[in-house]
């Protein structure tokens, strides 16, 4: 699976799909965090026992279910979209069913580097983007170091073309 897709001024970093067993476990947990509180709410409505405390508990379970849905979708379809413009960078986390985590950075100077993550044997890292030596942005997707090194070369070429 190709994790890095750089086309013109748009960079897409795809999250590596987790193992089938792990994804099944996460999806089952997500389904349970949705179905169990929902069935409890329906049972309370039918018995006429809905209280403010039970609504608060269902709201907490709803937040947990939303978080678990995001984790599930990220581990299956997750990707980071970085759009480069002149002196501006837009970042969006794409969960397939919805987008989240949009950020915008304005800068005069940009620098790219790699930070190793995980075990040394994995040879993986994340992309670090520094803006004007003040602000720093780290991607989430763990990518092979060799791919990241090639990506940084291409990003520097792209940035140098924009500056001309």
Image (spheres, rainbow, N blue to C red):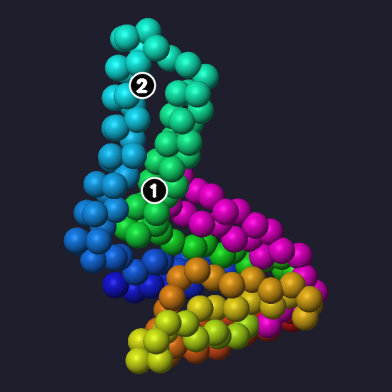
Front residue (pair 155, 149)? 149
| Mark 2 residue element | helix
Kindly identify the residue that appears in the image at 47 percent across and 66 percent down: 12
Residue 25 visible at all: yes
Q: Is residue 30 left or right of residue 130?
A: left
Q: Position of residue 109 (x, y in %)?
A: 77, 79
For marks 2 and 1, the one nearer the N-term is 2
Q: Position of residue 51 (x, y in %)?
A: 47, 16
Q: Residue 7: which disc?
A: none
Q: In percent of the image, x 39 and y 87: which residue is there?
A: 119
Magenta stretch? 89-111
User: Which quadrant of the figure has residue 23?
Assistant: bottom left
Query: Marks 2 and 1, Cα distance to the nearest angstrom?
Result: 19 Å
Residue 8 can be seen in this image: no
In the image, 7 versus 66, the foreground residue is: 66
Image-quadrant location for residue 40 = top left
Q: Disc 1 marks which residue?
A: 68
Marker disc for residue 41: 2
- Can residue 96 be found in the magenta stretch? yes
Vertical side of 20 occupied by 50: above or below: above
């Amino acid at each position: 699976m190709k994790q890095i897709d750089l086309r013109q001024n748009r960079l897409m970093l795809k999250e590596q799909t987790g193992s089938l067993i792990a994804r099944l476990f996460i999806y089952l947990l997500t389904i349970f965090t949705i179905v169990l509180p929902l069935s409890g709410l329906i049972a309370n409505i039918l018995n006429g026992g809905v209280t403010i405390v039970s609504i608060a508990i269902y709201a907490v379970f709803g937040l947990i279910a939303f978080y678990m849905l995001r984790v599930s979708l990220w581990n299956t379809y997750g990707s980071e979209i970085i759009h480069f413009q002149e002196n501006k960078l837009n970042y969006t986390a794409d969960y397939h069913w919805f987008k989240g985590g949009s950020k915008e950075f304005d800068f005069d100077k940009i620098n790219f580097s790699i930070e190793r993550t995980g075990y040394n044997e994995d040879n993986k890292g994340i992309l670090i983007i520094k803006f004007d030596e003040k602000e720093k942005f780290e991607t989430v997707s763990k990518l092979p170091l060799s791919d990241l090194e090639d990506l940084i070369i291409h990003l520097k070429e792209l940035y140098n073309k924009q500056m001309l």
